[in-house]
Amino acid sequence: VTFDNETISDAIEKANRIAPRMSGTTSHVAGIQIQIDPGQDDPVTIRATNGDTFWSCWVDVIEATGEPATWRILGERINSITRDLPMGEKKRVTFSDEVKSNRITVKGTRLNAWMAQLVGDAFPLWEPFDEEQTFPVEDLSEKVEAVAWAARKDSTVLPWSGVMFDGKHVVASDTFRM
């Protein structure tokens, strides 16, 4: 799969914000998933999750060839490669998989890197959704930002804390106030 450097760098950076960081123990959800299906109109989907938040986006490609594949890789590792890519017109990078060694190779101008894929159930799969039932929400980030200050920062301690939106309303709670 060949990408414009700026496009893949931006998508991986956003996915890496969701993917958890590795620590002393291995998380079963640590990582980013890249799905490739060259036969589709939008052949590449990048997904990330921390177990609570699931993020997904379609990524524009320059070229996608070969068989459909699903790659699961550490967010920190791929982000460390893509964030340093040279930006500009006609700056491209190609990702390919080496099935026998279970790794992804990344090649670009003056770049030749590889990363191991996560094995087994190292990334949770979630059910596909019906795109026909989705709709754009104007100014979503501004709406969430307007109420986020009211949310408890440590939402793991108490239930019913955080930011919730349903397409019409955005609310925040610190467990005691909404």
Image (cartoon, rainbow, N blue to C red):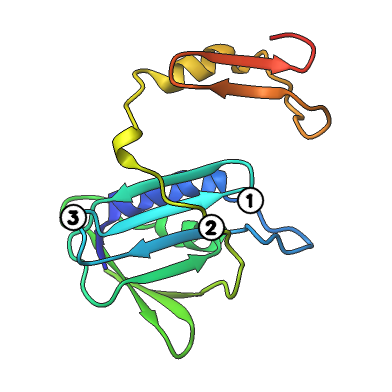
To which residue does mark 3 refer? 41
> What residue is drawn where x is 29% and y is 51%?
59
Q: Which mark is residue 113?
A: none
Q: Position of residue 14 (x, y in %)?
A: 45, 44
To which residue does mark 1 refer? 20
Q: Which mark is residue 75?
A: 2
Looking at the image, residue 57 sits to the left or right of residue 116; the answer is left
Closer to the camera: disc 3 or disc 1?
3
Give me the C-alpha separation between circle 2 and circle 3: 25 Å
| Kind of residue indicated by mark 1 | Pro
- Specify which label sits upstream in the sequence, 1 or 2: 1
Q: Secondary structure at mark 2?
A: helix
Residue farthest along the right direction in this orientation: 157
Give me the C-alpha separation between circle 3 and circle 1: 30 Å
Looking at the image, residue 84 sits to the left or right of residue 80; the answer is left
Q: Is residue 53 above or below residue 93?
A: above
The N terminus is located in which quarter?
Answer: bottom left
Q: Position of residue 72 (x, y in %)?
A: 50, 66
Give neighbour class at mark 2: few <14, some 14-19, many 20+ (Cα, 10 Å). Answer: many
